[in-house]
Image: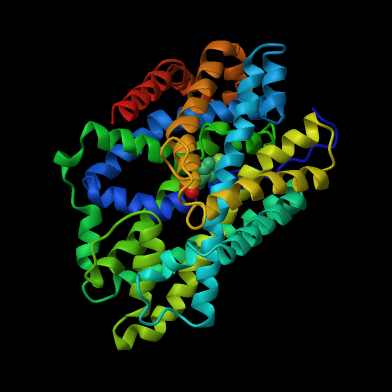
Amino acid sequence: MASGRENFGSSTAAVLAMAGSAIGLGNIWRFPYMVGSNGGAAYIIVYLLLAIFLSLPILLSETIIGRSTASNTFGAMEKLAPGTRWKWVGLLTIVSPLIILSYYSVVGGWSIEFLWKSVAEGFGETSPELFGGFISRPWAPLVCHTLFLALTAGIVMAGVKSGIEKFNNISMPLLFVLIIVIMVYSISLPGASEGVEYLVKPDFSKLTPSAIASAMGQSFFSLSLGVGTILTYSSYMKKDADILASGFGTAAFDLLFALIAGFAIMPAVFAAGIEPGAGPGLIFETLPYIFGTMVSSWAALGRIVSILFFLTIVVAALTSSISMYEVGAAYLVEERGMSRRKAVALIFCGTWLLGALCSLSFGPLSGFKLFGETIFNFCDKLTSNFLMSFGSMLFVIFVGWKMKKSTVREEITNGGKLKFSSKIFGVVYFFIRYIAPVAILAIFITNLLA
Ligand code: PFF
């Protein structure tokens, strides 16, 4: 173990950090729409099963590698499989989160701009063009991206305990309070029940293979799998922490938040008589329109709720972006001997530049295409459709086939001390070794054919 390495202060802090990484834009702008358009409660059941039987084995695999080595992704591979090509997996999973961070920070920047707009003037009779007009300007989005990335860098610079742990300990409870307040408001709007029905009414006929494959993709993105963030955070976990319980806790918080976000957003959308959508359009066009055009008795509240809503998005995005930043910082400090300050500065330069290109791809660089996609979309597709599942596959294969079974058992059961984990170890191992790799391959193929 690298000397002077920090740890999270408690198991709760570790779970909050992992849940912080998991809970982010994905929960807010994609999950509610996917539930509604793919069969409501039927989709939620499938999503839950996938989370338990597929995503959890991947999450546990990353946790086992991280906690057993107490190293960054590259160092972990070098410790467990010295001198082999596995180190490339370590390197790949440093690059992928930094690519995600670059474009995620651009969206984080938009959220800051919209938070500011909510506070300063509200949305009034906002036209849907507001958003398109904002992101295609060259400078303002760049400034906001810089601000978001600087906030992220500041937290990471403060260290694992005084920066990341402290920020998550405060932010995670705050996020739940905020989203619950928004949900209560949204459900109480006249005409909201249609939105509730949209989310819960089960329709099993909508569960097509492609709906299931996209649920898996959503689950990976939402739980931050396959890009080394969970591995890195787990490397700061104490040796007596219960890996299974932490994994369940993280997945449960993530799903719970996604569901509450659904009930916070869709009832308001239906109350305003608008067709729901997903992605940036939902958050930055539909919702500001709703906040700005609430019927008179709700207008003042609409303003407050819009402030709370964009604050939720900024904080949720920050708890995710710090996890991506930390993957690179841990590597540079531990493997390249850099000071934390220098590591943070170097990552800032690289991700700022790529993020700037992503940001400009909505304006001056919109004509520049990579494989037929704008730079922003290319980075998004490369990571969400490919690198995350590829990394997840490599992690489960590593734990299921390359690591010694006794080491895996030792980690999951804390040397036999955890009775429940010892009892179900066989099942967990079976899922990591056989089920997860096959299922991930199935997503790959479905995505390729789609
Ligand atoms: N889980 C985050 C979300 O749902 O928005 C996104 C994310 C965070 C992806 C961290 C990857 C990552 F490493």
Please say if 177 is above or below 259: below
Q: Nearer the viewer, residue 184 or 204?
A: 204
Q: In the drawing, does residue 276 fall left or right of residue 81?
A: left
The answer to which image quadrant residue 83 occupies is: top right
Please say if 434 is above or below 160: above
Please say if 279 is above or below 75: below
Q: Nearer the viewer, residue 390 or 167?
A: 390
The image position of residue 157, as x and y in percent, is 76, 51
The image position of residue 343, as x and y in percent, is 78, 42
Residue extending farthest to the left is 205
Q: In the drawing, does residue 48 fall left or right of residue 114?
A: left
Q: Where does the C terminus fall, quadrant-wise?
A: top left
Q: Where does the N terminus fall, quadrant-wise?
A: top right
Whether residue 88 is visible to the viewer of this picture, yes or no, is: yes
Question: How many numbered marks, from 0 up?
Answer: 0
Query: Who's the residue at 49% across and 28% down the image?
Result: 58
The image position of residue 59, as x and y in percent, is 51, 32
The answer to which image quadrant residue 415 occupies is: top right
Whether residue 20 is visible to the viewer of this picture, yes or no, is: no
Please say if 50 is above or below 256: above
The image position of residue 160, as x and y in percent, is 73, 46
Query: Who's the residue at 59% across and 47% down the image?
Result: 102
Query: Who's the residue at 56% across and 61% down the image?
Result: 109
